[in-house]
Amino acid sequence: MNKKFNTFLFVMGATVFNIVVTLLTFVLLLMFYARFLTNVLPDEAHTWVLLVFFIAAIVVSFVVYRRILNKMLAKIKFEDYFDPIIVGRGRKPPPQRKG
């Protein structure tokens, strides 16, 4: 396998992982809501609770993803196995005037 294919697999795997963590967190928060908060909160609050839980699930998945990525960065030298996704362009020298 070459570096570009490794990068593609890593991005796809990280995306699937992030989606799965988001869904699991959202389901766990919904189970918590159904178990403890359904009878406590008024009916008008249900929509807001779902919105807050959805945003919380995204934040939790981002935090989990960053922690795992930082641990991987500490153990693996990414430059050896992956191609950079965004390649910075070198600055060109300014054009010289003839005259």
Image (cartoon, helix red, strand yellow):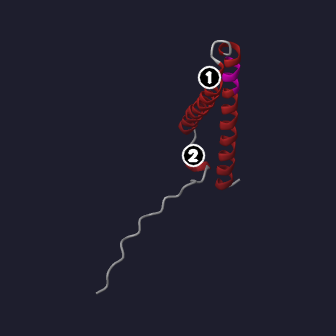
- For image coordinates 57% across by 46% down, the residue present is 78
Q: Could you tell me residue 85's position as x and y percent? A: 58, 54
* Residue density around tag 2, few if under 14, some if 14–19, many if 20 or more, within 10 Å: some
Q: Is residue 9 above or below residue 52?
A: below
Q: Nearer the viewer, residue 36 or 97?
A: 36
Above or below, 70 relative to 33: below
C-alpha gap between disc 1 and disc 2: 46 Å
Q: Quadrant of residue 36?
A: top right
Amino acid found under the numbered disc labelled 1: Ala
Residue situated furthest left in the rendering: 99
**Label 1 crowding class (10 Å Cα cut-off): few <14, some 14-19, many 20+?**
few
Is residue 74 located in the magenta-colored stretch of the structure? no
x, y percent for residue 93? 37, 70
Total numbered badges shown on the rendered structure: 2
Residue 71 % position (x, y): 56, 33
Residue placed at 33% from the left, 78% from the top?
A: 96
**Closer to us: 88 or 54:** 54
Residue 78: mark in rendering: 2
Q: On residue 45, which mark appears?
A: 1
Q: Residue at x 61, y 50 (%)?
A: 82
Magenta stretch in the rendered image: 27-32
Picture quarter with the C terminus = bottom left
Q: Label 2 near label 1: C-beta < 8 Å?
A: no
Q: Tell me the number on the disc at residue 75.
A: none
**Mark 2: which amino acid?**
Phe
Locate residue 70 relative to residue 38 in the image: left or right. Answer: left
Provide residue 49's location: percent of width, then percent of height. 62, 25
Q: Identify the element where label 2 is drawn.
A: helix
Secondary structure that dominates the magenta span: helix
38 in relation to 78, above or below: above
Task: Find residue 28 and report its image quarter.
Answer: top right
Mark 1 vs mark 2: which is more N-terminal?
1
